[in-house]
Each structure stands twice: as structure tokens, then as C-alpha cells.
Amino acid sequence: STAVRLATDVLVSGRAAVPDTALFTLAVAAKIGHPSTTQQQAYAAIPRVCRTTSTFFRFLAFCKQLGNLRWGRRQRRMVSQWYHSFTPLQLAYGVTKYKQRHGFSHVDVLRLAHVKPASAGIAAVFQYVVKNTMMDYAGHASKTIDFLWCCRRAQTATLLELPAIIAAGPLVREHVATCRLNHIEVWRALLPHMPIAALIRNLNKLSTWQEL
């Protein structure tokens, strides 16, 4: 439909400073659009337009606001396609950076949608998220597992150990325990790989240490 096409174009091109309106449009199309055309197009667009946990869960939250969030075959397929639209390492980064948003968590969504991993790397991520356990090293999944180990170690590491773990990941601010973010050594380790948006949000804190 025209609405789905326009919303998809706005989100893919990055023309929306805040994506909520376009995401809500897709949610309306997915919930009350024509099943064989509009709904199908809306669900098919989600893996393309929702490239972060925050936007994906925002879409699910809009669907829930519009009525009961039914986990039918079409919606389960969409959820599976979203998780499999990333490489294992990209997925590991995304699901550990934001474990929950907008009333949803990866644990709940994976279980409700009955998502089955299509590769060893994706399976390693799912096991870490759902069961909080680590998979044994296996072939091309080794880089993903290395990253997940860094995420786990970052939660319990000492202040002396943490900078090396951050650099090895590399990890971002959301991977680090909040109590560690009051130490300049941690921020120095985070800076080389800090996304520009996160850097702007934390300029005040960094300027107090004269790091810029």
C-alpha cells in the first residue's frame, strides 16, 4: 500500500528525526490492513526498517497498543526474519546493548515467537540471551562467542580489568555496569569505539574530566 511504502521509505532513508510516526503507520497496517496485501507488506518491511532493538520493540509496543498482540504465524515469521537479518556478531552486539525496551525483552520475544536459530552463531546468541549460558566454541561462531564472553566478564570485572575487556569486545557504554561509569579509566577505554550520538549525549560528563 502507499502508506506502507511511504513509511518504509522514510525509515530506510533516515529522513525521520523520530521514527515513531512511521513505525505507528506500519503497526496500523500490520494490525488492520488487508491480510494478503497491506499486512504482508508491513511485516515484510520490519527487518529492513527496524535496525535496532529500540525501533523493533517500539513497533511491537505499537501493535500491542492497537489490540491484543497475537503471535500468529505471520508475526512469528516476521520476528524470526528480524533476528536473522543480522550477522551473529551484529545480533550479539544489538541484543546485549539493549536487553529490553518499551515493555519487551529479547527473552520474552524469542520465547513467544518460537524463533529457531538458523546457524551456530545465531544459536550462540539465543542461548546466551534466553538461558544465560555460553555455547562451546564452534567454527565461524568463535568471534561471536568471544564477544559474548567480553559482555559477561564486563559485568563482574575489576576496575583494573575492565578497560582491556572493553577494548577486546569492543564494548560500548551499555555493556558496562552503571557503577563503573564514574571512573575516567572506563570512559577512556570506551571513547575509541563510541558512536557519535552517544558521544554527543555524554559530552558534559567527558568535559568534566577534560577528556576532549
Image (tube, grey):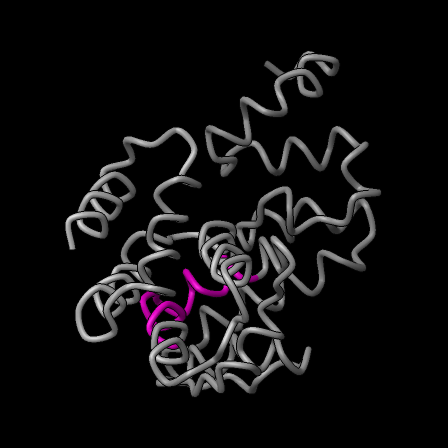
Q: Is residue 83 magenta?
A: yes
**Residue 80 vs residue 35, the one in the foreground:** 35
State left or right for residue 25 relative to residue 146. Answer: left
Q: Is 5 displayed left or right of 55 in the figure?
A: left
How many labels, in total? Answer: 0
Residue at 54% in and 63% down:
64
Measuring 68% from the left and 16% from the top, which residue is drawn there? 204
Q: Is residue 72 above or below residue 6?
A: below
Residue 100, given in percent of the width and then of the height, sits at 63, 59
Whether residue 2 is in magenta: the answer is no
143 relative to 136, above or below: above
- Quarter of the figure with residue 199: top right
Q: Residue 169's x, y, as percent? A: 55, 55
Q: Which residues are magenta?
A: 80-95
Above or below — where is 132 with respect to 164?
below
Where is residue 40, by image quadrant?
bottom left
Nearest to the observer: residue 162 or residue 206? 206
Q: Is residue 148 above or below residue 10?
A: below
Give the left or right position of residue 92, taking residue 32 as reference.
right
Location of the C terminus (image quadrant): top right
Helix, strand or loop: magenta stretch: helix
Q: Quadrant of the N terminus?
A: bottom left
Tell whether 53 sits left or right of 40: right
Q: Residue at x 49, y 59 (%)?
A: 66
Residue in front for this viewpoint, 165 or 127: 127
Looking at the image, which residue is at 49% across and 77% down? 70
Counting from the top left corner in percent of width and height, residue 127 is at 58, 82
* x, y percent for residue 107: 62, 74
